[in-house]
Structures are given as C-alpha cells and as structure tokens.
Image (cartoon, helix red, strand yellow):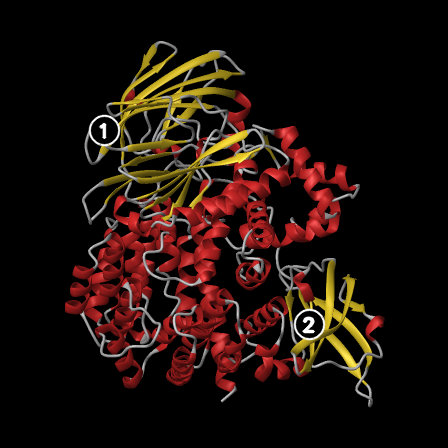
C-alpha cells in the first residue's frame, strides 16, 4: 500500500514546511506498465538544517536533486514510500525523476484497456493519500500548493486536469498553475475520451463545462441530462454560497473501473462509469446520479476551496456535501421528494452503521491513513448529514447559510477544523454550540424513541410520553427536537390529524398537549424526520401498518414507518417473516420507486439472512408469487414494472418461476412493456446460474453477445456464482492470487457469495482467516479493505463463525483498521443469529 502517514507525522511536517509549488512533467508514452514522473517542488522550511521526507509510492527512482545537490536514489525507501530529505534550507527546490507504475486497482494513475476497441484510458484517484503514486509530493491536505502540469501523450488523446490547458500540440500538453490546492484533489484523466461541451453563465462568470466518457459508451451518453443537473446545481450553490465558482472550468468524467461513486477533484470530477446507463433504469437511478453530481459540486466550495486540516474532519467534508446535495435536489431539481429518499436510504445506512460495535463519534479520532480509509462509512456521510440537518434547524437556516458564507470568506484557499465552522455559526446565530457539539459530534451511538401512553374507556389518551433509550455501551441521552404525529384511517388514506412539536430531553418527556386526544390508528414519533434517532412503533400502530402501510398518504411518514419496521426486524423485535409479509402487503402503495427498490432489497435480505433457514424457500416463494402478479399488472413500460421484474428475478426459486425467467431470456415469454435489454439479460442469466439451471456455456455465449467491460464483469461474477464446489474453489483461487483488476476482483467476490445454499461457502470460513492477514499486509489499501470486508463469511450464520473470528482477533492482534472490519463482520453474524431465533419463535 501507499505510505501510511500518521497524524503526528503530518503535523510535524506541516509545522516545518510551507509548500509553494509543484511542477510535474509526465511522459505517458513509455509503455503499458510504467510512465515517467518528473517532479520539481519548491518549498520553505521553518527550521533550516532540519530534515523531513517526501512521499513517492511504487516507483523506480532515477534521480534526486535537492538544492542543486544530487542525493543517492538508493535512499528511497520503497517499502514506506518515502524519500528522506536531509539538511533543508530556508528555501528549497527538490527534483525527483522516477519511473512510476500504472495501477489496476483504482488507486493512483489507473490504466484501463477497453475490450471493445482496445483503446487505453487513464484516470487518477488520489483520496485519501494516493497522489504520490503519480508524482512526488507532500501528500497531506494541509500542505496546499500551486500545481503546474505538463504531459506527453499519444496525439489522439484528450488530456484533462484541474484547469484548462494553455498549450497542446503534437501530443504535448501544458496546464498553467492552479491556485493553492491539496494534493488529494489534483487529477489527471487521459485517453481518447468522447467529450460533449457546454457553458454555464452566472453574473459575469462563464464556466466552460465538459462531460466525458469512453468512446465505446458514447451512444448511451446522455450529456444533456447531466448538464441540466449541473446548471441547476450551479444556480443553487452560487446563490446560496454568495460566492462564485472558484475554478476556471468544470469537467465531469465518467471513468472505467472506479472504486467509489465519484471524486471531487477540483474542476475535474470523476464518476463511476455505471452512471452512463446503457440499459433502461428507473427514475431512482437518475435521482441517485443527480445527488452524486450535486454532492461533488458542493465540494468545490466546501472541501476544495476550504479544506480540512486533517482527516479527523472527513465527516464534515462529506456530511456537508451530502446535506447540501439533498437540499439542492429537493429545491432546485425535479426530485422534490429527495428528503424522503434521504430518510429511507441514507438514514437507514447511518442507523445500521451506528449500531455496529465499531461505531464512533461523528468527529472521529483518525491517527493515520489506514484508519480514515475504513471511515468512509454511514456515520461519516449519512449520520453526519442528518446531524447537520438538525444543526440547521437549531441555528436557523438563514443563520446557517450566513455562517457558511462567512466561513468561506474567512478561510478561502486555506485549511480549517470543525471549530472554525462552529465559530462562524455561533457568530451568525448567537447560539453557543459547545454543548451541541459535545452531545452530537463527540459521542457515539443512536438513541431510540418510543411512545408510551394510556387510553381511557372513551378511547382517548389519559397520558402520553416519549421515552428515550440509549445502548448500554453508549449511554448518552441527547436533546431531540421532534414532532409527534397522530394519523387516522380515512377514505382518503391514512392521514395526519394532529402534530405536536417538542423537545425531548432525558429518559421520559411527557406530552400533555396530547392528553384527551382520541387514540389514532398510528402514532409516529419523529414525524417529519426532524431528529436522528431510531423510532419504535407501539403494538396498536404496528397492527395498523401490517395491512395498511400502503394507505399512508404522504411519502415521508410512510418512509419513516418502513424504516422503523426494518430496524425492528434487524433488532429481532419483529420476525423476519412478518417483515416480509408487511412489505408484500404494502409495496403496491409505494409510489416512490427508490423506496420500493430499497424495501424489496430488504425483504430479500430478511429472507436470506434473518429468517429461519427452514422458512427461506417459503419466503422466496411468497415474494416471487407476489412480484409476478405485480409485474404483470403494472403499467407496461413503467418504472414500477421494471422494479417488480428485477425483484422477481432475484427471488425466483421454483421450477415454474425459473421457467418464466428462462423464457424471458430466450424470448419464448414476453411481458408487454418490459424490454429485455443487455443489463436485464445479465440479471436473468445470473439468477439461472445461481440456481444451477445454466452454466459456463451460457455465460460464454452471453459474453460473446456483450464483449464489453461491463460484460466481462458480469461474466466473472456469473462464473463465481456457479453453485458447485469446483466453481467456488476456482473463484477463490482467482481472488486470493491478487492479480485481478479491481472491477473484476469485486465482481468475482460478489459472485462467490451469491448463493442460496450457504453450505457452498462454509469452506471459506477457514480459508478467509488463513488469507486475510497476508492480504492486509501485501495488497493495496482499497483492495485489501475490500477483501477483508466482502470476503468475510457473513452467510455462515453459525456460532462457530463468531468463535473463529474471536480466536483470530485474540491470537493475531490485527492492525486497528482490520480489527474494525472483522468486528463488524462478527457483529453481522451475531445479529443474523438473533434474528433467526426470533423468526423461528414466530412459527
């Protein structure tokens, strides 16, 4: 892996150095394995005569020159990825010439060959600490500098970086210096990319826009739709922040084999290529893409213009962008129900993460780079954004926006910490945020709120209170601003009759305003989703939902009820089979496609992991029967029809249902409005593979139909999904060899554990623990973390899996970041065992 820089080392280096500029000259024409990286750094040193180090990973160093004096290239520590710099002057110039290696893991400068036309595409991914895979640098966020780039590339290539080129001729490109930015948001994208150009104008500012994808995807590229969201985002953010866009152009590049959703490189944003939709998708996919586009755009101000000092404040960087992207979606785009999606998807992720034994305060302690790399989690993004939403309500939206504007004005092009933002918000709101910060940002765990009431003979409340609980390990009872909603069944659906807003403080908060109110059909604590807390439904309300959840008239309260029910299932308070039946009874009434897709995924998870194994076949059969009816009754060509069809395919198990799947694939069965396009064909084939109905011959034939990068990924996953011991063993051998490209590696892992018969993966408990330590120490950061998390035998829901994990932790004492992933895996198995026990008792 690239060097594991510690926080203490970064602080020492930041105290010692002032970095002025980088001049990087890259030659990308020297072969398929390496490129020439020639870097000149100019920097000051506060303690002349002192020493430090500069970062460079995986390179063969040709030349090191410091202040005109040659240093021994052999001084480069390849294992740590560092070049020692002795006897510094007050003003220094360092030049390092090296042969650097292209990556196939999605880290550093990644090289990809398109199987369609054999064209080569490059792009960088540097967050958190991988810029020094491409050029020599002080790779930490608080050593900002100007970045000037020259590139030699094949003449037919596009070369894109943080700003526009001022010269390009004969394959030689030059880009003038950027403003002072952090290394992790510098970028390079190069290759014969297809490009569409546009422009956005705001006041006197004209921002050139570019949208890029591989040439073989150009026919599917909906650049106009991407530009539409982009322009709406610029309208919203330029107005909201009252500050012009800080860079000179805005390119968005959809790149192959990307490990994340997107990356906020300054003026050069990279996106997961899956956002170029080559087959029909539902509106939920467009909504998710829009949120990602807006998230990265928000970073141009919050993250790129003003940057965290160290990764302790990663949460603030990501949470702010998440909050602002959803706010922009809801107020400036067609997806006005974005907060419903947020409640159903983002907060569900946050609640799940916050209940793991590895939970941590939002403002986390990040001692080194390995720690931050496993901290891109539901707390950093979703809980943080939820709490920011509360903070906006607490200080007032106008005060919040005014404080953010002041923060940008005060710290533009600099580095900050959380206290800098809170200081600005205190000034504009007049509120002391010290206690709020301690309560919400510096403590871990999620509270549970539940209603407690008594009802008289007349059916009215004689008492009503909101009870607050905290987990034993994290006993903080917080202050919550909540609304309690009373909902009645009416001919127009289940609608709200009364709403009371109050502060919940401590273990019990009485609500005298509700005494005398007739008990409703549904009591909803945290109506309108004002706070971050798990909510519980009383027995009477749960009875209403069992056969009536689809009758709730509004999307947000319906999503909150679904979220509560799912959390109760995961906590073994509701049997998995009852949750599945709840979904099947209410799914028809769910009009929000993203919510419907989420619910159907959760129903599958409940059946596969949380239900009594003896009920699994029954559960899948119930879902398949219901979904088959729904897909055939849905409006032809509608998002609902596609959603139901995809969900049906994923649970088909009986001979009848599998026959229908096979018929859709070979064309002998048709459904009006359902187009069997490329991606749906792969989905149909995958299910048949998992059930053992087809094998290698059919996979090879489908790959011949779709000989693309996506087709190769699907085929790799399908081969790993073949339900035989031999196929699983072959997939495992390919995985642990460590030489698969990152996208094929992830696909193969996914296929290996796509099983209905969990006995097929039982042998990989011991195999996993035999390999995970070696993988962690030898592989790159992203690949090793992916293996540690996704190869963990989570489907073997037996006490022996927990015992084996505990023994490994005790005997091997793994590094903290690996320990965290193992503890999370163990907790998932323990949770599944408890849920299965609950479900078994419901028979």
Q: Which of the 4 image quadrants contains residue 252?
A: top left
Disc number lying in front (1 or 2)? 1
Give the label on residue 542, or none: none
Q: Which of the 4 image quadrants contains residue 415?
A: top right
Residue sitting at the far top: 68
The relative height of residue 659 versus residue 383 in the rendered view (above or below) is below
Q: Position of residue 100 (x, y in %)?
A: 28, 30
Residue drawn at the location 32% of the way across and 62% of the way down: 750
The total of numbered circles placed on residues is: 2
Residue underneath mark 1: 155
The quadrant of the rendering that contains the N terminus is top left
Query: Can residue 354 be seen here?
Result: no
Residue underneath mark 2: 524
Query: SS for tag 1?
Result: loop
Q: Front-most of 614 and 699?
A: 699
The relative height of residue 336 versus residue 441 in the rendered view (above or below) is below
Q: Residues within 10 Å of mark 1 (few under 14, many from 20)?
A: some
Residue drawn at the location 70% of the way across and 38% of the way down: 403
Q: Front-most of 33 and 707?
A: 707
Residue drawn at the location 37% of the way across and 59% of the way down: 790
Label located before the other in sequence (1 or 2): 1
Residue drawn at the location 23% of the way across and 75% of the way down: 667
Left or right: residue 821 versus residue 390 is left
Q: Position of residue 678 (x, y in %)?
A: 27, 62
Query: SS for tag 2?
Result: strand
């Amino acid at each position: 892996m690239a060097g594991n820089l510690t926080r203490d080392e970064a602080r020492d280096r930041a105290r010692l150095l002032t970095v002025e500029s980088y001049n990087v000259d890259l030659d990308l024409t020297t072969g398929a394995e390496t490129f020439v990286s020639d870097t000149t750094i100019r920097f000051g040193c506060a303690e002349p005569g002192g020493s430090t180090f500069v970062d460079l990973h995986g390179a063969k160093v040709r030349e090191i020159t410091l202040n005109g004096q040659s240093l021994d290239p052999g001084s480069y520590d390849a294992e740590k990825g560092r070049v020692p710099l002795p006897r510094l002057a007050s003003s220094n110039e360092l030049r390092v010439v090296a042969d650097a290696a292209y990556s196939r893991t999605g880290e550093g400068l990644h090289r990809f060959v398109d199987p369609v036309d054999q064209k080569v595409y490059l792009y960088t991914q540097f967050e958190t600490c991988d810029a020094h895979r491409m050029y020599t640098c002080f790779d930490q966020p608080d050593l900002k500098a100007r970045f000037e780039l020259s590139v030699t590339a094949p003449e037919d290539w596009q070369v894109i970086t943080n700003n526009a080129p001022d010269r390009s001729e004969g394959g030689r490109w030059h880009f003038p210096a950027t403003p002072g930015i952090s290394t992790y948001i510098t970028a390079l994208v190069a290759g014969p990319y297809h490009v569409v150009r546009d422009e956005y104008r705001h006041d006197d500012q004209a921002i050139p826009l570019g949208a890029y994808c591989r040439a073989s995807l150009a026919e599917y590229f909906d650049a106009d739709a991407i530009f539409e969201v982009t322009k709406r985002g610029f309208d919203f953010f330029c107005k909201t922040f009252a500050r012009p866009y800080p860079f000179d152009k805005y390119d968005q590049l959809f790149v192959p084999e990307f490990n994340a959703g997107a990356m906020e490189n300054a003026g050069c944003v990279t996106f997961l290529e899956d956002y170029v939709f080559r087959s029909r998708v539902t509106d939920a996919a467009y909504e998710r893409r829009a949120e990602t586009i807006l998230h990265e755009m928000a970073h141009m101000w919050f993250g790129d213009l003003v940057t965290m000092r160290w990764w302790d404040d990663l949460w603030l960087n990501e949470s702010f962008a998440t909050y602002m992207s959803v706010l922009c979606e809801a107020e400036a785009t067609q997806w006005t129900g974005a907060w419903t999606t947020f409640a159903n998807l983002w907060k569900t992720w946050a609640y799940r993460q916050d209940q793991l034994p590895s939970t941590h305060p939002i403002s986390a302690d990040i001692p080194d780079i390995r720690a931050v790399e496993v901290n891109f989690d539901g707390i950093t993004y979703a809980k943080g954004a939820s709490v920011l939403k509360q903070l906006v309500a607490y200080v007032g939206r106008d005060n919040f926006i005014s404080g953010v504007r002041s923060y940008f004005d005060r710290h533009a092009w600099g580095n900050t910490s959380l206290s800098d933002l809170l200081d600005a918000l205190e000034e504009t709101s007049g509120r002391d945020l010290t206690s709020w910060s301690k309560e919400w940002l510096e403590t871990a765990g999620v509270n549970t709120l539940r209603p407690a009431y008594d009802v008289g003979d007349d059916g009215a409340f004689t008492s009503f209170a909101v009870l607050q609980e905290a987990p034993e390990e994290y006993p903080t009872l917080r202050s919550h601003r909540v609304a309690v909603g009373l909902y009645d069944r009416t001919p127009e659906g289940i609608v709200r009759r009364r709403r009371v807003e109050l502060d919940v403080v401590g273990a019990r908060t009485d609500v005298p305003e509700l005494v005398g109110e007739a008990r409703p059909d549904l009591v909803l604590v945290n109506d309108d989703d004002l706070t971050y807390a798990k909510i519980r439904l009383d027995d009477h309300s749960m009875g209403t939902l069992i056969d009536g959840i689809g009758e709730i008239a509004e999307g947000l309260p319906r999503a909150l009820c679904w979220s509560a029910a799912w959390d109760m299932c995961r906590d073994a308070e509701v049997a998995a089979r009852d949750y599945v039946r709840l979904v099947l009874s209410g799914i028809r009434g769910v009009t929000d496609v993203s919510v419907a897709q989420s619910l159907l995924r959760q129903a599958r998870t409940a059946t596969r992991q949380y239900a009594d194994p003896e009920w699994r076949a029954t559960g899948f059969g119930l879902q398949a029967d219901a979904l088959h009816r729904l897909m055939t009754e849905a409006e032809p060509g509608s998002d609902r029809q596609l959603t139901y069809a995809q969900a049906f395919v994923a649970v088909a198990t009986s001979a009848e249902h599998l026959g229908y799947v096979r018929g859709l694939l070979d064309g002998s069965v048709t459904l009006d409005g359902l187009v069997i396009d490329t991606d749906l064909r792969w989905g149909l084939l995958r299910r048949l593979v998992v059930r053992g109905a087809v094998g290698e011959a059919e996979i090879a034939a489908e790959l011949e139909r779709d000989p693309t990068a996506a087709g190769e990924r699907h085929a790799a996953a399908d081969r790993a999904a073949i339900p035989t011991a031999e196929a699983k063993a072959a997939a495992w051998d390919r995985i642990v060899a460590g030489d698969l490209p990152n996208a094929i590696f992830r696909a193969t892992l996914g296929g290996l554990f796509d099983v209905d018969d969990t006995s097929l993966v039982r042998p990989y408990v011991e195999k996993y623990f035999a390999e995970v330590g070696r993988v962690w120490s030898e592989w790159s950061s992203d690949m090793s973390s992916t293996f540690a998390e996704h190869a963990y035998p989570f489907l073997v829901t037996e006490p022996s899996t927990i015992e084996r994990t505990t023994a490994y932790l005790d005997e091997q004492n793994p590094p903290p970041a690996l320990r965290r992933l193992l503890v999370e895996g163990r907790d998932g198995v323990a949770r599944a065992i408890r849920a299965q026990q609950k479900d078994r008792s419901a028979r």
